[in-house]
Image: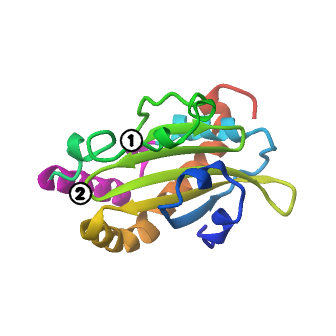
């Protein structure tokens, strides 16, 4: 479910210290019924085990395939345009005690882990269009439960980046986030099988 940007910006997340030059584009919530205050690592593990491009819906897979094809044709994802050559990683802004909480080896997809705490985690990517951060947070709900929140923070690369973000906005809301919601919430419901643990 889409949430107001203030649902991210008003919370005392560590990521705020390091992203004053980024814009919060989207804030989304994911239901995790039965989750407790210490279940954030289990949610992340279930998502990692049960989510992936191969498990996405047809429209979402097609959309990503088109994006990667365009990126290859136009050079958007050239390594020289990514973290390091063009863009300094946010890890350089962070203290070692924070970056030591996550292995910076890229996981599934294009994001590189920045840190992982008991109630929040952040990953970043950069290409010719944007420098982006995916922030995941663990939030207590009014009924005493907990749910996952995702915020997408972006620093566009000039006019190209701003145009790119404007063009993909309807696809994010109509295809990408609904598909992600179904996938991530299903991973949590299926956590016992995915993680080989008791729910």
Per the image, label 1 sits on a secondary structure element best described as loop
Judge whether residue 185 can be spotted in this image: no
Q: Among all residues in the image, which is located at the extreme left?
A: 73
Per the image, label 2 sits on a secondary structure element best described as helix
- Residue position marked by numbered label 1 in the rendering: 109
Q: Is residue 88 above or below residue 25?
A: above
Which quadrant holds residue 83? top left
| Residue found at x 40% / y 61% | 155
| Magenta segment main secondary structure | helix
- Looking at the image, is mark 1 or mark 2 nearer the viewer? 1
Q: Is residue 174 above or below residue 8?
A: below
Judge from the rendering whether residue 113 lies leftward or rightward of residue 160; answer left or right.
Answer: right
Q: Position of residue 47 (x, y in %)?
A: 56, 41
- Residue position marked by numbered label 2 in the rendering: 66
Q: Is residue 116 magenta?
A: no
Q: Front-most of 121 and 188?
A: 121
Is the residue marked by circle 1 packed among few (<14), some (14-19), or many (20+) residues within 10 Å?
few
The tag earlier along the polypeptide, 1 or 2, is 2
Judge from the rendering whether residue 71 lies leftward or rightward of residue 19; answer left or right.
Answer: left
Magenta-tinted stretch: 52-74
| Residue found at x 28% / y 72% | 163
Q: Front-most of 105 and 3?
A: 105
| Residue found at x 52% / y 66% | 26
Q: Position of residue 142 (x, y in %)?
A: 84, 63
Judge whether residue 11 can be spotted in this image: yes
Q: Quadrant of the N terminus?
A: bottom right
Is the residue marked by circle 2 packed among few (<14), some (14-19), or many (20+) residues within 10 Å?
few
Report, in whole angstroms, how far the alpha carbon at label 1 lies from the one at label 2.
Answer: 15 Å
Q: Position of residue 3 (x, y in %)?
A: 62, 70
Q: Quadrant of the C terminus?
A: top right
Q: Position of residue 57 (x, y in %)?
A: 41, 55
Judge from the rendering whether residue 20 lies leftward or rightward of residue 75; answer left or right.
Answer: right
């Amino acid at each position: 479910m889409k949430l107001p940007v203030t649902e991210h910006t008003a919370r005392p997340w560590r990521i705020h210290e390091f992203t004053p030059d980024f814009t919060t584009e989207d804030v989304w919530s994911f239901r995790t019924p039965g989750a407790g205050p210490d279940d954030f690592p289990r949610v992340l593990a279930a998502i990692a085990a049960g989510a992936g491009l191969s498990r996405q819906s047809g429209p979402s897979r097609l959309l990503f395939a088109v994006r990667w094809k365009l990126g290859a044709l136009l050079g958007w994802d050239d390594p020289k345009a990514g973290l390091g050559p063009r863009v300094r990683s946010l890890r350089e802004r962070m203290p070692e005690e924070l970056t030591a909480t996550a292995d910076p080896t890229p996981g599934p997809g294009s994001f590189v882990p920045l840190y992982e705490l008991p109630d929040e985690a952040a990953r970043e990517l950069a290409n010719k269009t944007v420098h982006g951060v995916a922030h995941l947070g663990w939030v207590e709900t009014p009924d005493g439960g907990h749910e996952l929140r995702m915020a997408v923070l972006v620093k566009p690369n000039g006019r190209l980046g701003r145009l790119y973000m404007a063009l993909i906005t309807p696809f994010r809301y109509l295809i990408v986030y609904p598909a992600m919601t179904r996938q991530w919430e299903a991973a949590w419901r299926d956590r016992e099988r995915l993680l080989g643990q008791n729910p």
